[in-house]
Amino acid sequence: MEERKLTEKESLEVITSMIARTKQRYIGNGNILLMWGYLVVFTTILVWIMLGTTHQNVWNWLWFAIPIMGCSVTPFMARRQERDCGAVTYSDKITSQLWTIFGISEIVLTFMCLGFQFLGDIYCWKAMLTYTLVTAPIAEIAQGLIIKEKSLIIGGIVGLLAGLITICCVAGGIPLYDYWFLPLFIVVFIVMMIVPGHILNYKARRNK
Amino acid sequence: MKELDPLLHSQLRLAVMSILMNVEEADFVYLKEKTESTAGNLSVQLDKLSTAGYISVEKGMSGKRPRTTCAITNEGRKAFEEYVEALRTYLNL
């Protein structure tokens, strides 16, 4: 493109053409999703195995590995993705803020659960898992709708269904025993984050 | 009839402003690719838009590489909207 004066009609063409070019959406890869997905799944497997074999509640401290490791790595991965894309759109900003709100609420809830554990109720950790199963899918469905990615929407719906069932169990007095609830949590995160993450990575590789 | 803003009434500057109206921020490489311009020419035009207060230019580092990020200012947004409005009257749209 050169630097030259335009006619009014050419001006309009330049504006239209540039708007069309910025609409070519860069969806990005699924690396952040995969990092969180694998982190949650492996931590949950570890907690499940340790609680099941030792019956020591001290293993619940492992849950802290999720926010500590995830929140440390995510900013670097996000900055790299932003650099690869070259531009930040309004929808990118909204999606990022949505996950930030979710992340902050999870950290606050983790500390609240810890407080309640010291008061003597170990069952409070299930509140964190229940909350996660409801809010994370909502954030994921919203992201899927914004970037028009079906795998995120479907994964989010599956997660939300599991979350709603969990709420009904809590309200109906059905105990969330580790032997079925933690595996459910693992399966949901595989469907909700790991599968869409790999699909996004596949699409990103194909588009290169 | 209202005169068209001479600063915007040039191909590359108008292209840059049109892109920045549609994104929150964009880096130099992205603008260069989308406008299909040369680095030297784009740099000069970004300086002109920045001096006029139409865009903000932030120079930073991304890892070990330098990264220039541009975003439209409120003044630039207003100027662009007025330019489009003037264009509509010229073209009887």
Image (cartoon, coloured by chain):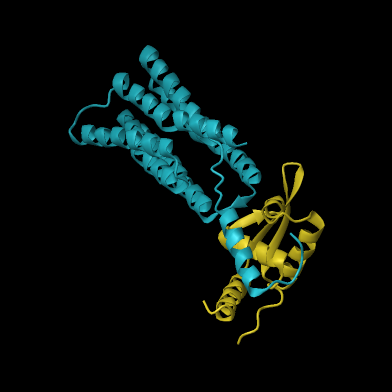
Chain colours: A cyan, B yellow
Q: Nearer the viewer, residue A174 or A205?
A: A205
The outermost residue toward the bottom is B1
Q: Residue at position x 70%, y 66% from top?
A: B11
Locate the N terminus of chain A and report the quarter of the image it occupies.
Answer: bottom right
Give percent across and percent down for residue A81: 61, 41
Q: Residue at position x 67%, y 70% from top?
A: B54
Q: Nearer the viewer, residue A104 or B70?
A: B70
Count how many numbered circles sit on residues in the image.
0
Q: Does residue B70 appear left or right of residue A128 in this picture? A: right
Q: Nearer the viewer, residue A45 or B26?
A: B26
The outermost residue toward the left is A172
Quarter occupied by residue A19: bottom right
Q: Residue at position x 39%, y 19% from top?
A: A48
> Does residue A130 appear in the picture of this structure?
no
Q: Nearer the viewer, residue A161 or A169?
A: A161
Give percent across and percent down for residue B44: 79, 64
